[in-house]
DNA sequence: TAATATGGATAGTGTCACTGTCCAACTATG
DNA sequence: CATAGTTGGACAGTGACACTATCCATATTA
């Protein structure tokens, strides 16, 4: 199919598709002539994936590219994908310092002692370079700067719940055999589910709060 | 203190403080003269809160304002705060439709049948207007549009974990008595913890993946 | 062959979160 | 009191981001 059909079938404007092509999020079509290219179902699918990541999940185009790249490159190694595909946080840009791309190694463990302690306590085996560590230490530090006494031990119950969540995630993944599809599913379950998971927590919080305080008028305007 | 000291003590540039004042995130100081105002510790604290929300959590300035406003207005009703303070998603702007401020009511439940079913199945009592419902339905719809067979029932295990998480959250909250402080803590635990919780899941996922697949070389470059 | 579509390049748009500059009014110091 | 420095407020400018629009030399289709 040509670009217009891709646009029509995906609902993504023509110009935007070109933009994604430029940015490398969408692989170029097979060129049939100097000014003509042919796209197929994989392009359509990729496009939907891009919109899911940038739309529902709210990733920036650059972050989506990283995830997509990791997905296609490491399609044989789901486990590594899960580790690598992260390194991305909400499209905030705040608190950069994200130029530690290489050679950080040990330093990161040192730099994130709380995450390290937590990982240790849980008996987890995760890369010292997993950026999630940094998120944890940064959050804890921020919390404490606001006088909330919170340390990695306070996160232990959450870690156990996360462990169960992860087990559930991986169970879901194991039903898929095709490596490419598996990698895609991993991305979907890891990233797309995040807002929904947080939404569940908010729902549960409201419910719990209602249950503890006055249990009526909770639906009032 | 004057603006410079506020800037020095918070690490937020002078110009940025002025910007927050303009945007209404930071309440104005007590004017001592036509071109002079006095700020106090509450301003400093608020500033730190703003940076925590926009920095670690990645909220947009506008979203942070909503949260902060809800926090100060509903400081008497923590339970309602938890329901209201959301309505904000990552600063993506994608898929808006967020102009349902009033009179949506029933329509939202209708519009989000999966969230409704889930809430029902869990026996939860939450407002029909809680925007988290929309996030859930939207995520599920997106997932299915990508051929991942996923419905609210698949979310049930997560909902149960969320319930436990929420219980844990509320427990932590109950130790605080001062209503203002409680509202602040609620915001902190609800919002600031989110990235950390997601980080935990990623860590747990990597660990679980390592455990299931080859258990070595997980730290390799 | 003429009208239309396409791919690629480049420029422009609107939003966001600041950042810089001005200036009149203050304050601190000599 | 003079004068240098600081402030609050207004407003313009900046750079990043995610598009969106315009061109134009082909290609395709009628």
Image (cartoon, coloured by chain):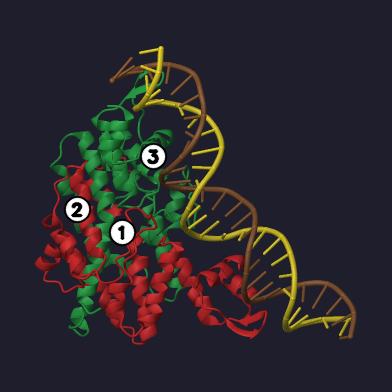
Chain colours: A green, B red, C yellow, D brown
Describe the element under mark 1 as helix, strand or loop: loop
x and y, in percent, of residue A186 in the image = 24, 44
Q: Are marks 1 and 2 on the same chain?
A: yes
Residue A16 tag number: 3
Q: Are marks 2 and 3 on the same chain?
A: no
Residue B97 tag number: 1
Asked if B16 appears above or below B29 in the picture, the reply is above
x and y, in percent, of residue A198 in the image = 27, 62
Residue at the spot 20% in from the left edge and 57% down from the top edge: B137
Whether residue B163 can be seen here: yes
Whole-angstrom CA distance, mark 1 to mark 2, is: 17 Å
Q: Are marks 1 and 3 on the same chain?
A: no
Q: Is residue B63 left or right of residue A51?
A: right
Q: Is residue A197 left or right of residue B157?
A: right
Whole-angstrom CA distance, mark 1 to mark 3, is: 21 Å
Residue at the spot 17% in from the left edge and 63% down from the top edge: B159
Q: Quadrant of residue B172?
A: bottom left
x and y, in percent, of residue B63 in the image = 40, 65
Q: Nearer the viewer, mark 2 or mark 3?
A: 3
Q: In this view of the protein, which residue sits in the foreground, A127 or B19?
A: B19
Q: Residues within 10 Å of mark 2 (few under 14, many from 20)?
A: many
Asked if C22 appears above or below A59 in the picture, the reply is below
Marks 1 and 2 close (CB-CB < 8 Å)? no
In the rendered image, which quarter contains the N terminus of chain A? top left
x and y, in percent, of residue B160 in the image = 16, 65
Residue A98 tag number: none
Q: Is residue C17 left or right of residue B201?
A: right
Whole-angstrom CA distance, mark 2 to mark 3, is: 25 Å
Q: Which residue is mark 2?
A: B140
Q: Residues within 10 Å of mark 1 (few under 14, many from 20)?
A: few
């Amino acid at each position: 199919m040509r670009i217009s059909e891709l646009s029509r079938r995906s609902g993504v404007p023509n110009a935007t598709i070109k933009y994604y092509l430029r940015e490398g999020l969408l692989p170029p079509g097979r060129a049939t002539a100097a000014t003509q290219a042919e796209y197929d179902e994989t392009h359509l699918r990729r496009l939907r994936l891009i919109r899911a990541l940038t739309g529902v999940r709210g990733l920036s185009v650059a972050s989506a590219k990283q995830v997509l790249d990791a997905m296609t490159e490491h399609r044989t190694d789901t486990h590594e994908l899960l580790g690598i595909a992260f390194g991305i946080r909400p499209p905030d840009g705040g608190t950069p310092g994200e130029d530690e791309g290489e050679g950080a190694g040990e330093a990161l463990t040192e730099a994130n002692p709380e995450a390290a302690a937590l990982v240790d306590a849980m008996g987890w085996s995760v890369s010292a370079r997993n950026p999630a560590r940094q998120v944890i230490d940064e959050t804890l530090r921020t919390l404490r700067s606001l006088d909330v006494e919170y340390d990695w031990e306070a996160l232990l119950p959450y870690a156990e719940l996360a462990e169960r969540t992860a087990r559930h995630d991986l169970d879901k993944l194991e039903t898929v055999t095709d490596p490419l599809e598996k990698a895609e599913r991993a991305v979907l379950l890891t990233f797309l589910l995040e807002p929904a998971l947080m939404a569940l927590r908010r729902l549960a919080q409201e419910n719990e709060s209602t249950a503890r305080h006055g249990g009526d008028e909770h639906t009032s305007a």
